[in-house]
Image (cartoon, rainbow, N blue to C red):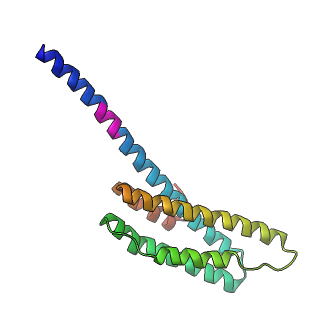
Amino acid sequence: MAGIAFAIIGVLYAILMTFVIVSVWEAGDGAQDSSRAEARAVVDLNHYADTLPAAEGAAMRELTGEYIHIVEQQEWPAMAGGQPVGRAGSAVISKLWKCVDAPLPDGADAAANRQSEARADLRALTLNRDARLAAADAGLPSVTVDVFTDVVDDGTAR
């Protein structure tokens, strides 16, 4: 009788462990996906900067570079150490919004379309940043730390 009870308990324990492992794996995949999407948004904003006049484009590229630096040098180490991230990344995003929302010359339909796409990219950046920070609060798998850096360094999403 004891053998049968232990066998049943063992099977139930194996099923429970399977569910736990699958849920942790899916959480890691979600964090990795949001990190990739955040990096893609930064790359897309850099491409948008290429379509702007020289001064505005340079300012936008400087802000995206500053954001990348903050994420790599400040936020990822803080997240890995279980510490809260600072407000520097949010401050750069606010500056990016000001650049993207800058008035356009009248009659510039193509520029208005590009500006609309840049707004969508900036919204995606903000949403995926929030998802990354939420994943860090829940316990971020270590593999996602390299995803953002790889995508931004290459300028492409893998």
**Left or right, 37 with reference to 146:** right
User: Looking at the picture, does residue 104 appear above or below residue 118?
Assistant: below
Answer whether residue 97 is magenta in the image.
no
Q: Give the residue at x 67% y 67%.
A: 119
Q: Give the residue at x 38% y 41%.
A: 23
Q: Quadrant of the N terminus?
A: top left
Of 46 and 12, nearer the camera is 12
The outermost residue toward the bottom is 55
Residue 110 image-quadrant placement: bottom right
Q: Give the residue at x 73% y 66%.
A: 116
Give the percent coordinates (x, y) of residue 67.
Answer: 50, 75
User: Looking at the picture, does residue 65 appear above or below residue 156?
Assistant: below
Give the percent coordinates (x, y) of residue 53.
Answer: 73, 82
Residue 114 image-quadrant placement: bottom right
Answer whether residue 20 is magenta in the image.
yes
Give the percent coordinates (x, y) of residue 79.
Answer: 36, 65
Disc tally is: 0
Of 143 and 90, nearer the camera is 90
Specify the segment rendered in magenta.
16-21
**Left or right, 147 with reference to 125:** left
**Left or right, 27 with reference to 104:** left
Q: Main secondary structure of the magenta part?
A: helix
Give the percent coordinates (x, y) of residue 131.
Answer: 48, 58
The outermost residue toward the left is 2
User: Looking at the picture, does residue 140 appear above or below residue 116?
Assistant: above
Q: Give the residue at x 41% y 75%.
A: 86
